[in-house]
Image (cartoon, helix red, strand yellow):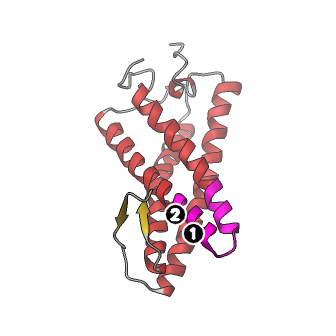
Amino acid sequence: MQWRNTDQSYGILAQGLHWLVAGLVFAQFGLGLYAAGLPLGIARLEWLTRHKSLGLAVLALVLVRLLWRFVNPPPALPHAMSRPERLVAVTTHRLLYALLIFAPLAGWLYASAAGLSVNWFGLFQLPDLVAKNADRAALFKLLHQGSVALLALLVAGHAGAALRHAFVLRDDIMRRMLPWTRSRT
């Protein structure tokens, strides 16, 4: 296993960050939907506290991943991909990164404006980003929900594209991100 990316494959660190963030994002979808469906009370607050903590973890890991990507560029897209496919792939990745940063920040802004504390797994309290304000809270809640819905659509499209590459096109695109396989080239 290589730590760094090569021309043909992602390194183990990039792969690990990818799959860890993916797992946390799926957990976040479930936690957020579950907590939102609970009646107001202690149980809902406890589940939302977990959701906020995981959201902060996603935010931190995505920032680490972007830093790693900056110092260790990913493998180039294959020349066999058409120009429109390349454009869609690059745009989707950029939007995914943007939403993986924006959605947790919008959630943190919502919690701050709603007067709900944000702490990380009970270890430390984070500062409020804005003063308590019901109108702002409603706006940030809408932005958080909208960005999460768009993120869910992009994740589904990203996963669908990866499966298309693996099972229809049978190229190395998905294989490059799987730690237990080797690139065929």
Query: Which residue occupies 47% across, 75% down?
Result: 116
* Residue 146, picture quadrant: bottom right
Which mark is on residue 49? 2
- What is the count of numbered marks? 2
Start-end of magenta stretch: 30-51
User: Is 71 on the left-hand or right-hand side of 98?
Assistant: left
> In the structure shown, which secondary structural element does the residue marked by tag 2 occupy?
helix
Nearer-the-camera pick, 184 or 113: 113
Q: Position of residue 9 (x, y in %)?
A: 45, 23
Q: Is residue 115 left or right of residue 161?
A: left
- Image spot of residue 157 (x, y percent): 64, 45
**Which disc number belongs to residue 32?**
none
Residue identifier under label 1 = 45
Left or right: where does residue 168 sit relative to residue 162?
Answer: right
Discs 2, 1 touching: Cβ within 8 Å: yes
Kind of residue sitting beneath label 2: Thr
